[in-house]
Amino acid sequence: MTVLVTGGAGFIGSNFIFHMLQEHPDCRIVCVDALTYAGNLSTLDSVMGRDGFRFIKADIRSKEAMEKVFSEEKPDAVVNFAAESHVDRSIENPSIFLETNIIGTQVLLDAALRHGTARFHQVSTDEVYGDLPFDRPDLLFTEDTPLHTSSPYSASKASADLVVLAYHRTYGLPATISRCSNNYGPYQFPEKLIPLMTINALSDRHLPVYGEGLNVRDWLYVEDHCKAIDLILQKGRIGEVYNVGGHNEMRNIDIVLLILSHLGKPESLIEFVQDRKGHDRRYAIDPTKIHDELGWLPETRFADGIVKTIDWYVENRRWWQEIISGEYRSYYRHRYGETI
Ligand code: NAD
Ligand code: DAU
């Protein structure tokens, strides 16, 4: 079986490749990635050149490039991780989000249809449901929660989901979708909350907490997300959406305090900064469907996963120091008004 993994030089895609090569040694993995600022070939060092793995630098928005990949590799399944993934960047520059996340997905869907690909799996997000109030802890996102997006990022992901479902209904493309909550773990780009705060704390820089830090995210260790996608590929029902999350809601400020405490750094490093525009208050996933239908359950407790993750950044300084490129430095200066 050949699985085409798009966006595999990014955070979750790379972890998925490691998971698949480990758990399914007979599986051939072809990774397509455009190597944007968020994609890093060094992340894939341990699998590069290995039998059963091929890396192709290509852009999912290019019909010609995707036609070539599908003709050469004839994938049995596509798992589409490739995306612009950072909400703050989507607020600054929405266009690239619409181009990559919507048009890029549609180019892949067309290629999959033309080549009779047996499964197209779209990696989506809980952000397509919008947000939940703070004072209704009983409310969770189910697969039937209406789409109600806030940012250009989430609007582009919801649009892509609708296009995937349209290709299933109209053309019979065998598609599935997963909508996961916030992931954390190794190889996450340092623009995101947990690596950003960890790296800043390690460098005794300010930890920029938006608003009062009271927004809530539902955190899942990346390996648990990868296992969920693997299960959906094996046993998921065609045309279905599966929510993925581990009932682990945390306020941002509590995550930041935990990172400082684990690293033995002072709370005085925290700086409350201007809030994100349209900031979603709370996300919380109801994973009943994937549990009941496919038997999926998260395996990593947050208390263990967060320590593993912080320690990974401590032990892999070279990885993040190398990827903090000129582009990231100027993004950081523009966004936070400080140099990194
Ligand atoms: P990431 O930003 O770390 O990685 C994205 C990858 O896609 C990068 O390697 C980048 O080079 C590649 N890419 C971007 N544009 C491309 C293009 N036009 N053609 C080919 N490759 C391109 O993102 P991530 O956090 O690993 O997220 C992966 C997927 O999972 C995204 O679709 C995201 O919406 C979804 N998701 C993320 C989370 C999370 O917490 N990070 C949670 C739920 C869902
Ligand atoms: O829920 C899934 C989504 O999780 C994915 O679809 C996105 O790709 C992924 O980036 C993530 O989105 P968030 O916006 O939740 O993640 P981020 O790490 O950017 O922010 C997490 C929370 O931390 C959010 O409430 C904003 C806050 N924050 C973030 C940054 C970067 C800060 O307070 N300060 C910061 O500097």
Image: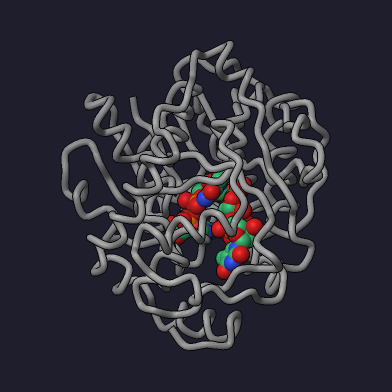
What's the residue at 72%, 27% (across, down)? 143
- Left or right, 311 with reference to 183: left
Image coordinates of residue 322 in percent, x first then y, are 29, 73
Q: Quadrant of residue 215?
A: bottom right
- Left or right, 143 with reference to 112: right
**Residue 203 appears in view:** yes
| Residue 153 versus residue 275 in the image, above or below | above
Q: Quadrant of residue 120?
A: top right
What's the residue at 34%, 72% (across, down)? 202
Image coordinates of residue 17 in percent, x first then y, are 33, 40
Q: Quadrant of the C terminus?
A: bottom left
Image coordinates of residue 109 in percent, x first then y, are 60, 39
What's the residue at 35%, 48% (across, down)? 307
- Left or right, 100 with reference to 266: right
Image coordinates of residue 255 in percent, x first then y, are 52, 54
Question: How many numbered dots are placed on residues in this image?
Answer: 0
- Left or right, 89 with reference to 4: right
What's the residue at 66%, 22% (across, down)? 239
| Residue 108 versus residue 199 in the image, above or below | above
**Residue 34 appears in view:** no
How is the rendered protein coloured?
one colour
Q: Quadrant of the N terminus?
A: top left
- Determine the quadrant in which ligand 2 lies: bottom right
Q: Residue furthest left?
A: 50
In the depicted view, which residue is nearer to us: 149 or 196? 196
